[in-house]
Amino acid sequence: MKTILCYGDSNTWGYNPHTAGRYDHKTRWPMVLKHLLNAGTPPDDPAWWVIEEGQNGRTSCREDPVEGDRNGLRQLIPILESHKPLDIVVVMLGTNDLKPRFSPLPYDIARGVQRIVTAIQDSRTGPEDTSPAVLMICPPPTVDSPGFKHVFGDSGELSKKLPFFYRALAKESGVAFLDAGKVIQTSTADGIHLEPEAHRKLAEAVAEVVSTME
């Protein structure tokens, strides 16, 4: 059985933009991914184990002076070591780096996520102390909505510039890449989070990439 760790923010955790609660296990994209990857395998002998590691507000490598302990790079190694051996780590971060409090540039956001990728590659938390394979996902653009405008401001145009830099830095790091904005859209309910259908489509896209990484 192979293991995948999904490392991300509230859209990996499963934040519901309509209720501010959490989607159930059947809705969240890592759990949909688990179902897709194990289709056709015996329930008591799955081919893949999928681990959810999402945190609301998690950044790539930035200390958040308002929300506190959200630095994804600082949290990373203990999480990797607690779940090893890991065959694949899927990283979808960067949305929270868009917040005006960080005065972000698109390249800097992508470089922050690349630092996560590099740390995974150097972690020796794969099978027999190898490096896990990595899938670097660029999150979908934010959209105009009053829901989180007080936190994210006018981040839509900035978020649309991320895929170019994510793609280039994923190639530089030699890891798989997925532009989530090509397959899903952010909910207009709050401008940041995903509807159930988007979770399903994202899981399908990730499963397709993972099939090429085996």
Image (cartoon, helix red, strand yellow):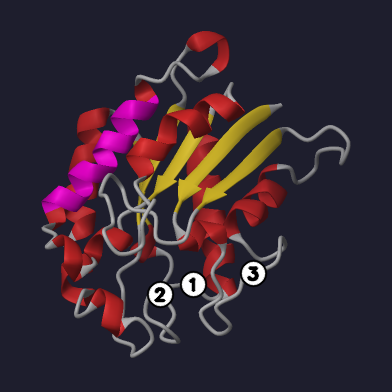
Q: Residue furthest top?
A: 128
Q: Earlier in the sequence, mark 2 or mark 3?
A: 3
**Residue wearing tag 3:** 23
Q: Are marks 2 and 3 in contact (CB under 8 Å)?
A: no
Q: Quadrant of residue 182?
A: bottom left
Q: Position of residue 46 (x, y in %)?
A: 78, 35
At label 3, the amino acid type is Tyr
Which of pointers 2 and 3 indicates the residue nearer the eye?
Answer: 3
**Position above or below: 175 against 96:** above
Lateral position of residue 28 relative to residue 106, left or right? right
Could you tell me if the residues under marks 2 and 1 are in contact, i.e. CB atoms within 8 Å?
Answer: yes
Q: Nearer the viewer, residue 33 or 108?
A: 108
Q: Earlier in the sequence, mark 3 or mark 1?
A: 3
Residue for point 52% across, 70% down: 198
**SS class of the residue under badge 1?**
loop
Q: Position of residue 130 (x, y in %)?
A: 47, 13
In the rendered image, which quarter contains the N terminus? top right
The residue range painted magenta reads 107-120
Q: Nearer the viewer, residue 137 or 93?
A: 93
Q: Identify residue for label 1.
A: 194
Secondary structure beneath dot 2 equals: loop
Say whether residue 81 is left or right of residue 57.
Answer: right
Which residue is outermost to the bottom? 146
- Residue 83 drawn in magenta: no
Disc assigned to residue 154: none
Q: Is residue 36 above or below residue 169?
A: below
Mark 2 or mark 1, earlier in chain: 2
